[in-house]
Amino acid sequence: MSKDIFYTQLEQLVEAGNTTEVLALLKNTPTEERLKYTKKISKLGKYYQEYVLEEGKSNSYGYRGNGEQRSAVSLAVLASCTYKDFNGIWFIAESEFNQVLEWYIPDWLGEYVNDRATEGWIRAPFNEIGYVYELNEKGVFKTPLTERTWATIMVSFSNVELFDKYPALLEKQFWYLFDHEVSINYHSWDEVIATLIAQGRLDKHRIVQTAIQSALTHTNQALSGWNANLLGKIGLTDEDIVAFQEDIFQLLNSPLSKVVNEALDTLFKIAKEKTFQAETFINHLPILMSSTVKATINKVLRIVATFDKSHPTYKEGSAVALVGAFHIQDQALQTKIAKQIIKYAKPNEDLNAQLAAYQDMMMSETKTLLADYITAEAIVLGEMVEEGEMELMPIAPIDTVEDLIFHCSSIWSTDNHYIFDQTVDAVVRLSPEITVEHIDQLLPAFDKAYKKIKDIWSGTPKQNVIAFWMLEWSRMLMEDTALDTTALEKIYKKHSKEELYSHSQTSLADVKLEPSNRFKYYYSAMRPYLTIYFYSLQLLKEKRQFPILSLPTHEPFYIDAVVLVDRLAVYQKQGELIDALDLQIALARLNITTFAEGLAHVKTVLKGELLAILEFYLGEGEIKEESEKYYDVWRLAAALKYPHKAVESLANDRYTKEQQLYCAGWLGNWEVIEDSHTYEDWDYKTKKKVEKVFTHKKLKLEQIPYDINTSVLFSRVNKGMPKTAVGDRMGSVNLMGLIKYQIMDVSISELADLMTITPKHLDAVLMAIVERCLHYGGSATFEVAEKKALQEVFTYLLQMNKVTFTDQFYLFYGLGMMADDKVTRSFAAEYWIKEALHLDQKRLGHVIGKALSKEYVTIKRLTDSIQGFMMNVSVQHNQALQKLIEGILCEMNETPIKGFKSLLEQYVEVLSTNQTKVTNERVIELVETWSKVSTTKKAAALIKNLNS
């Protein structure tokens, strides 16, 4: 058949959407003939399946081809393309596969299914295990299916009937479920396995060994836990467990408490047996007792208490090993351990030495119990060393073009908060010195910037804004007739010929940072940088050298006040109008420890309104607003100097008192409320769908009334940054208004970085983190982005000097100390240690106690942090901890919440160590009430004894 006739016919039939005729044509054309057109047919498939802007619509996309056309071209692609050309097609439906596979099997079919399994999602019809098994038996997969592929397909078919129909699957493919990390834990495979063992179709011993091996080797914690839990689901008798105990003991080496606890539960069933390997268990005790999980310790104690009768020779050895658990400062647990030690062993040199090593970690009652084993000594804490202000490291300046070239070579791998400011400042200052030779040395940096724009989805806002800025800078260089930029033009043209990304229909030559439909998202995400972006390009274009005011001078993002004054003097001497937002960011980044020196310097260098602004902000100067150009600067300076207080003299028609408060991040009261949702779920007992109610606690935040016109307020932000050609002057915008706007407009992953723009006023960002990350306090389902955002905020706080401790800060910090994420809690505890003397412990305790009293979070998160990080750091830390706990107790109810006993026990220890009495009347009153409640009676009695 002539190639013109075949391809022309095919193209016409596809355009007509005639799937019947397309299928007939393909069947009647030899395979060798069809494969000659693999490139053309692949291109045809991409054409009809391309996602394009719909005709006559400005922002609506759809497939170029209709349903019939896409189905027809899919048949052609399946029957005529090599795998390389097929793999570029987005989607082939199940019906197309079925129609072709009836008469033609591509050589690459096995490779296709394997690749989809690697991606984690296998499309129909290859997600049906029976269908794939039958194809495999026919030998149609020239490339064999991998073990991973079989496991991925099979995992969803957890029913015994599958193996009734295909018994051969039990010989090989079934076992792949254990070897690969597939979602076996989300299906009822434990029931299927138990049934198959009962039917004699699976070997119990092999299942046990395989499950144990999987529990130890999988990196997915849920899968490891499921495999360990399987041992309790397959009906092991005591005789089975005795036979398998050597294998089960291996699970005690797992780093996962879930796996260890499952093993301990299983071993407990045979601990009383003479055949129980007590010596092996004793050898594992040191590691087991070092666990931080109280459930693990309790399970160990239960086994030890059980085998002491059947294996009495190991009593003393177990007593010595149990001492290791005293690192957990929980009175009930320590009491249990102490009693078992007393029961199993008398005082001896080895045991006494072990106890002496843990004496500082023992609680007061534990020391009393072990009085015959230890020499009781009061804990002697050191004094807290007051280090003063954290010394900030100066940022190395970019003084030469050579420094700039080196800087640009590492720009994409540098992770600091001022990389953009530093880059544009250096280029503007050094541009007169840049020669053709320097441009050639900068070519790799420009090439990377072009590539970054082409891969814009993977970049951070800081990286993207640098890439856009370097693109504009390269265009300016190429327009400069005084420079030979042939090499740069060659790289630029090379990238300009290619699409930015697949199906974008945009090349590098079309790229401009503006709020168009295509780049609206990036423009919005970069809004805080835009004023510097456009202003610096204007300076570069006009060949004027002025410093970027907001460029930090010291890590992580602070500016020396003296340096800022000198930068302002450069502008004032030449009569240049200062960019309002650039100055606002600079003020928000000023290092408070340099205020006095900066104030003295400004009086000798500046004059007029700039002098008045700095005198007001750095000292006790008056508000002397003179120019409309700087009224946003005055309002920002007032918001930083007087947080949450509207300055009456700055309120006018342009900027009302309510807007000032709103932009300053004002927030009112908060409370914990219950939120209920009704949903349908399958009831396995009744075999019907039933309505269920899910109730959870969440925060209700009382914002400032929204009767102010926020759309007008935010329109100023957008008017301040219009669609602007390079070189146009940016309008004025209030920094706090911009931050509030960004909070509403950006993803959670970008929130923490806003702290680097205004470190002097964090409330707006902190409250956004509360609303997005901490609003469901009891949730255990935080996403990665939420954890990362919380951790980043605390990372910034740990680097900062003189944070303003507002009500908003205490709400964020108090909830952060009880966050679901352990890493976040450890950062919060570290910050508490750093700032213990500066924090108002009573205010912090009020927030924590208010949340705990409503059981918004589990109290264990707090008590674990106190135990692990905050107790016995120093004399002053213990005094601060006492105030914190008393602040919490004052907010608690008369009826203790679950786990409250641990907090009271910790309070007893702090009082004992501090050698103080309770003086807070509210706490004394509550302790009297708690002394009548069974769960808290003992701890309350100890507090009363200390007060007597």
Image (cartoon, grey):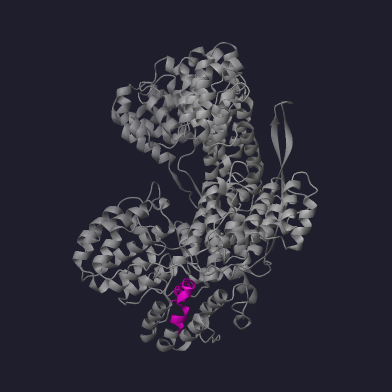
Compared across the picture, whether 775 is left or right of 94 comes to: right
What's the magenta region?
579-599
Please tell me whether residue 77 belongs to the stretch shown in magenta. Answer: no
The quadrant in which the C terminus is found is bottom right
Q: Main secondary structure of the magenta part?
A: helix
Q: Residue at coordinates 55% horizontally, 85% vertically from top-left?
A: 623
Please tell me whether residue 596 belongs to the stretch shown in magenta. Answer: yes
The quadrant in which the N terminus is found is top left
Percent coordinates x, y for residue 888 in the rendering: 68, 57
Q: How many marks?
A: 0
Q: Is residue 770 above or below residue 562?
A: above
Q: Is residue 596 above or below residue 790?
A: below
Percent coordinates x, y for residue 844 in the rendering: 64, 61
* Residue closer to the observer: 904 or 1: 904
Compared across the picture, whether 683 is left or right of 167 comes to: right
Instruction: Farthest residue to the top: give it.
Output: 200
Residue 700 can be seen in this image: no
Compared across the picture, whether 104 is left or right of 316 comes to: left
Q: Is residue 549 above or below residue 12?
A: below
Residue 791 can be seen in this image: yes
Q: Quadrant of residue 264?
A: top right
Percent coordinates x, y for residue 312 in the rendering: 59, 24
Q: Residue at coordinates 39% horizontally, 34% vertically from top-left?
A: 12
